[in-house]
Structures are given as structure tokens and as C-alpha cells.
Image: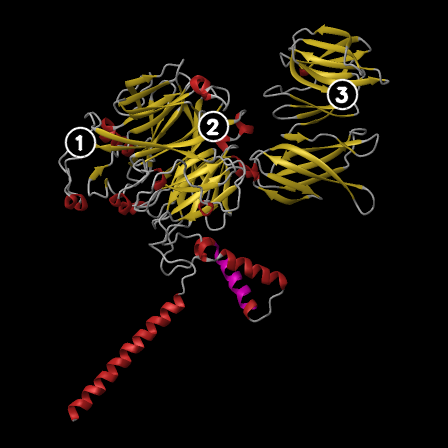
Amino acid sequence: MLYQALMGQFYGKRSFLLMGLAGSSKLALYHLSAKTGEILKDIQESLPGGLLGETVLVSDNVLVALDKARSSLLVIEFKGERISYNKVHVSDLVQDLSGSLELQSLSNGVISLQTSSSISLLKLKGTDGLEVLQRFDQPAAVSDSLTITEKEAAFAVVQHLGSEIEFIVKSTSDLSSEIIKEKLVIDQNRGNVEKVFLNSYIRTDRSHGFRALVVMEDHSLLLIQQGEVVWSREDGLASIVDVTTSELPVEKDGVSVADVEHNLFEWLKGHMLKLKGSLMLANADEVAAIQAMRLKSSEKNKMTRDHNGFRKLLVVLTKAGKVMALHTGDGRVIWSKLVPSLRASRCGGVPSALRIYQWQVPHHSVMRENPSVLVVGKFGAEPSIPGVFSILDSYSGEELNSMKLDHSVVQIIPLTLKDSSEQQLHLFVDSDSNAHLYPKSPDALNVFLHEMSNLYFYSVDIQANVIKGYSLQKSCNLNVGDEYCFSTKELWFIIFPSDSERITISETRKMNEVVHTQAKISGDHDVMYKYLSKNLVFVATLSPKAAVDIGSALPEEASLVAYLIDAVTGRILHRVTHHGAQGPVHAVLSENWVVYHYFNLRAHRFEMAVIEIYDQSRAGNKDVTKLILGKHNLLAPITSYARPEVAVKSQSYFFTHSVKAMAVTQTAKGITSKQLLLGTIGDQVLALDKRYLDPRRSVNPTQQEKEEGIIPLTDSLPIIPQSFVTHSHQVEALRAIVSIPAKLESTIVFTYGVDLFYTQLAPSRTYDSLTDEFSYALLLITIAVLVAAIIGTWIWSEKKELRDKWR
């Protein structure tokens, strides 16, 4: 049995008593020898109804515990070798019993009983029971007790009063009065107070002052002292769960950027400050304000989009259900919104399965409208729990629409289809395998019905170890007549044998990935057509013993199997087994290739493997002219139901680092070479050229292969120090890497964990743009000199010709 120690008390130096909890219904008292640890005597007492586990020590020999039914508090006293208890009904102390109950010991026999809507301060009345000394009926939080003197301790209570919070510090020896009672206004978008940490300091008059660190519902931190917020910190950014992007507004001709960022008063105030600075009349504070304005109005920090597409908004969703927009120029928070429909304090639970998607990206006729994002989540872990969604304005964070769904959400499928208002169509699949279309509008329904026969999707059930493929049907199996609900038809399934294989990861291509060329021309002028199906799915399975920590399985017991599966037909296009391989497995799928990372138990090293798949059905079409003009195979039907003729090339390499996350660079046109972005175990991001993972590498490449750019084969992949995107920085607790294309053939890399890291990356150098160090002045001087030389030469030539004619 496992015992939790609650109290240790020495009797002289020879023995001591230890009291613990055995299971949920027994208290155990042990008399142990301090010298040898020998149990001298033990007493066990059964308690009716059992204990929930909420137990606090009130004094040296009294503890208070909550029973299993959450209806009573047990005041338990032990004297010597005897245990006695008294029961107090919670309903006699607290009226509102909804939500969770939490016990907290303060000091001097005072405990707090916290519910979802109130806090009660209770005092121990000997061993007879508990009495209520004070109740806070607003949402509040209480800190641990802080020792001030040998006989006195203090604690803090922070409660909400409308748009204000009240900060109260009390002494445990006198609860009728307050040491400090202050009110201050905070941003209501931070939610309720969750935790309070009290700290004291000595004032100049030798009295005690207090400050409190407050943790809010959105996971932000506030330091409160002397009736004001000294500083605040958006620590919710340390728990990002998903991210998307939004374009900034277009800078219009003849309209100042100030009209986009500020109102007219702020614009005039800024110009007055700049005028005073030019006339040397500004004081130190005004000079600092001018410098801040110049920094804010610099090119990279403007609130309008740039020609190269680097200025964007990163819209991130945190674990607390808060959405924040970060400017890529300097990382500042443009706006933040704690989504009301996902607030734990209002919905009585912790939000889960949170995702964020682009909802509306205005173009053409709706160009004047602001873009918006879709946030989806639910409360609880059960798959049948109904979901909630909210639509937010990307520029202001205003909630445009929210809804508590009447169905669950187990899978969200963003479609490439849009309605006339540029709203992107999404399918929400519930636990009964019904698909629900959003937005619910006649226009969206017509667009969807026109393409429904060409839509397929798949689901991966890791628990059941099965993959299933579905098509959509018009009628819904629900009794209610919902024209936006569609039933699904199971087309295929693949069941993996659980005794030998367990699904560990599945990957597919990014929906917005752009492929520049459909073929690869080798050094001997042979044309190899890429297999570019967006229905391609990579699945990796591990043997049961290889699916746990490294070192838990022998090489003979471990194996990894990689599959390439067509998601429409369920056909397995390729299968390869790596014997002696163990997880964790990380993978990325792009164009016609997949790269995955695992551990080789036989070699005691990490490995990275690459698989490239080519379409052999088009191998006979080698007309390069038609390929360049894009007129090859124009009449050939493209369907997943035709049995593909594919050729596969694969290779594996040793790799030095363990990997925590993988991604691949994405660019606007897909022209530049690909780079793998690897989040290493050292919390750094390494950019590895895809050419090192070419399966056609050989030890002695031919002259034609060298001309093609194939690198000679080595057993391990090189780690070039200059290839670390994060340089000397570390992204603490790195979790994910996101690549976002810019308008140039460059990419934006955003990495998040506890820290955030953002940079711009050019996989094929900046061949399509000029660097920041480029000397435009020297270029203008060179042009001016050339023009002057041309004019001077022309004048000299004319004069010489005239002299020749007069001779």
C-alpha cells in the first residue's frame, strides 16, 4: 500500500510518529524508531464513506479531510496512539456546492474552503468542529500563509468586484481586520484570478509591506503593490497550442499610415513632438517618446502589408483559450482576446482540443472586409462532448460570432472551397461519423454540393489501431432535418495487428503547398515525374515494445514499418520495414517525398530515412518542350481509382541529434530548394538542405550526377554550425515549428515552446531581392556617372564630327 506522509513528530530523539493515508478509507498511525526506522507500533482506523484525498494539517495533531461524497469534512485528531474524528456537513458551512471543493491550510487553526464561486475562511473549534469566520461571495483566490513573526502569519485574498479586483491581506491571529485593503482596475479580458502568491518586505519605517504575484485565468502574471499593477506579463504565450497567420491591411495611396494605426489626435500629437525635437525644445521624456515613435513607425513595424510579404500577424491560440495577434516586425502583441465561449470560469471545465483556422481571407469583391479566424474547442476529454466555436476579427480581436454546437467535434477538415463572401468551408466530423458543414449558408451549401462527389477524408484511430476512409452522402442519419449535416460512407479500412504493430504517427501534405515543377530531370536527361497526389498519407507503426522509451526493448524485439497509403482507395503504395528501430518517430511529407526520424538500436544512433515516389505511368512522355510549356498529358484523366504505376527510391542516414519537431520550408511559388527544419533536443532549430537526403546519392557519383548537383554519399548527415536558424539562442521546451511563405521565394519560420522565436529564411539565398546592406546611394551615383559619361561622349562626338566636316 502507498502511504502519504502527513505529519512527523519527534519524541525526544529516539522515536517519532508518522500518520498516513492508506487507500481512500483508512488512516494509519505508525510509531517508528528514529535510529533504525523499525516500526514499533502501528494503528489503522477505518473511516466511513472514505476520503477524497483533499487533506490538510491544521495543527500538530489535527487534520481536516474531505470525504469521498464531497458532502462532509472530517476533523481528525490523534493523541499518542489513538485516533478520533468528528464529522461536519459542508452544507452547514457553504451554501453553493457546485463545482470543485478545495481545502487549504493557512495558520493558527485557520483553513480556507474554496468553491467555484466563493471562498470561506474556517476556524477550528477544538475538536468539536469548524466555524465560518468570513465568506467572500465573489470569484476569488487565497494565497498560502506567510510567516511574519514567530506567532503571526499573513495571507492574501484577491476577489473580483465588477471591473475591479480587491487585494486584501489578513493576519491569521485576527481575521476581523485587514492589514491591507486595496482596489485596482485591471483588464477584464484577463479573466478571473486563479492563484495568488504573497511576499513581504520591510518599509523604511520598519513596518511590513506586502506585494502579490497574481496568476490570471488567461495565464498572465500581474505584480500588485501599493494599489497598482507594477508590471504585467503575457505568460500565456508559453502555452501556445496552435497558430495561423493573417495579412495586414493594404496601405492605400494618398492615405497616411497614421490613419490606419492611430486617430487624428495621436497623429497631430506625434508631429508636434517631432517638431519640438527638431527645434531642440523637447525634454528628456519627450525625446524618449520621439524615439519610441520612430521605432514604432519604422518600415518593419508598420501596420500595413509590405511588398515582400514579411509583415504579417501571427494569430496564436493558447491553452487557456486566449487568442493573441503578434506583429512579425517586433513581436509586440497587437490585441488579445480571452474567448468568452472557452472561459473555464464560465463553462466549469478546462478547454481542450483547441484549434485555430483561417475563416475569411478577403479578396476581390470583399476586399474592404477584415479577415477573420475560427477557434474551435470543447470542455472535457470524452469524444461525445459538444464542441464550441468562435469567429474573431483578425485586426481587432472582436468576437464576430460564437456558438455552442449541438454535436461533438472529433475531426476538423478545412476545405479548399470558398463561398461568395470568401469564407472558407469547413467540415466538422462528430463522434457518430456525421459531417457538419460550416458556415451554414445557402451559398456555402451550393458550393459544397457541387464538389461533394469529389471529397473524401480519412481518420486515424490510434487507440483502435485502425485507419478508415470515408466519402460523403447527402442525407444525415440524425432525426432532425439539418440540410448542412451529411452522413458518411466507409469506403475502406486498414487494421494493424496490435500484437506486432501500433500506429505512432501519420502525416499528409500541407493543403496550401505549391509545387513548381512536376518532374525531375536527371543528369543523363531522363525525365522522372513526381507522384504529386494530395491524397498521399504517410503512416508509421512500431512494435509494442518499441513504442516506449529508448532502452526498453532489444533490437530483435523492435521494428518500425513505414507505409505510403492512398487516402481515397486505401491502397498501400509502398511499405518498408526497419528492423531494430525504435521511437519516438517524427516525420514530414512534402511534394513526392517523406522524411522520418527514429532511433536505431543496433547502431545505437539516431537515423533519418527518406522515401521518394515517382509516377511511372507518365514515364513514356519525355517531351521536354511540352513539359516546359505545360502541355504534357493534358487529356490524361487524373483519378485515384486508377491503379498507379509507381517507382520508389529510399535511403537512410545516421543523424547526430534527437529531434523534438520537424517541418519543411514553404515558399510562394515552390521554386527554391527545400530545407528541413529540425527542432533538436537542445531546443534549437537546424535547417538541413534536402539535397543531403537525396536517395540517389552514391559513394562515387558519375560526372552527370555531379553536374546535376548530387552530393557524394556519406553514412551520416552533416551538422553545419552556420545552419542553425536560431544561431546561439535556445527556444526553451520547443514544441513546434511553423513555416509560412512570403511573397518572395523566402519563408517565415516561427518556433514556439516556453520561448518564441521568429526569423526570415531564404533556402536558395536572396536571389530575388536585395539585402539590407545594399548601397542604393552607390547605385545612384554609378547610374549618374554613366549618364554623364554618355552625355559627355555624345557631345564630344558631335563636336568632333563638326570639326571633321569643316576641314
What residue sits right under mark 1 in the picture?
Answer: 617
Residue sticking out furthest to the bottom: 807
Residue 265, magenta (yes or no):
yes
Crowding at dot 2, Cα within 10 Å, few <14 / some 14-19 / many 20+, comes out as few
Q: Which mark is residue 604?
A: 2
Amino acid type indicated by mark 1? Ser
What residue sits right under mark 3 in the picture?
Answer: 58
How far is mark 2 from mark 1, CA to CA? 40 Å
Residue 577, given in percent of the width and then of the height, sits at 35, 23
As drawn, is 736 to the left or to the right of 518? right
The scheme the figure's colours follow is secondary structure
Vertical position of residue 34 compared to residue 661: above or below: above
Amino acid type indicated by mark 3? Val
As drawn, is 12 to the left or to the right of 556? right
Query: Which is nearer the N-term, disc 3 or disc 2?
Result: 3
Label 1 sits on a secondary structure element that is: helix
As drawn, is 247 to the left or to the right of 731? left
Vertical position of residue 399 compared to residue 625: above or below: above
Crowding at dot 3, Cα within 10 Å, few <14 / some 14-19 / many 20+, comes out as many
Q: Main secondary structure of the magenta part?
A: helix
Q: Is residue 773 in view from this perspective?
A: yes
How far is mark 1 from mark 3, CA to CA? 79 Å
Residue 614, given in percent of the width and then of the height, sits at 24, 33
* Image quarter (top left, top right, bottom left or bottom right) of the C terminus: bottom left
Amino acid type indicated by mark 2? His
Q: Which residues are magenta?
A: 262-276
**Nearest-to-viewer mark from 2 and 1:** 2
Residue sticking out furthest to the front: 700
